[in-house]
Image: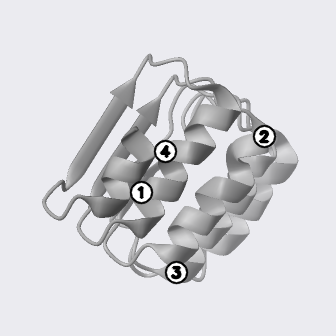
Amino acid sequence: DLGEMLGKNSSLTKLSLSNVRLDDEGAKHVIAGAKESKCLVVMEMINVGMSEGSGGALCELLEGSHSLRELNVEDNALGEAAAGVAETALRKERIEKLSLRNNDIPATATKRICDALKKNVSLRSLDISG
């Protein structure tokens, strides 16, 4: 399956999944494989049906991946969990581009993201609009 392939593949640098209905369970499986990848630089999981339940797996990916530089999880429903994802990405200082656009991010989460942003020097692009 895709999750296992990601962990074993030694040449894939970009994974783009758009409009594939993975929901939280499928997304977690793909994310677990991506975490094992030694070469994945860009990961796009746009409109794949993730909700707040995927937030922890995305944080684990950001904590564990040494190669990932860009994460795009636009058009999902991460809600409050988006703040944890952003905080982890900003703390690790490897991520250069992060898009959380259209994730139903509440004002409290936006404030947490802004506070974490003040401490980061590596991020070049952040999108939390919508």
Residue 82 visible in the picture: yes
Please identify, in this view, whether the residue under mark 3 or under mark 1 is nearer the observer.
Answer: 1
Q: Which residue is mark 2?
A: 52
Residue 120 shown left or right of residue 78 in the figure: left
Residue 40 picture location, percent across and down: 27, 60
Looking at marks 3 and 4 on the same chain, the residue that comes earlier in the sequence is marked by: 4
Is 130 above or below relative to 35?
above
Q: CA distance from mark 3 to mark 4?
A: 21 Å
Pick whichever, 6 or 57, lies toward us: 6
Residue type of the residue flagged with mark 2: Glu
Looking at marks 1 and 2 on the same chain, the residue that comes earlier in the sequence is marked by: 1
Q: Which residue is mark 1?
A: 34
Asked whether the residues under the numbered discs 4 and 1 touch, taking CB atoms below 8 Å apart as contact, a structural biologist would say yes
Is 72 above or below relative to 76?
below
Local SS, label 2: helix
Residue 76 picture location, percent across and down: 61, 28
- Name which residue lies at 82% across and 43% down: 107
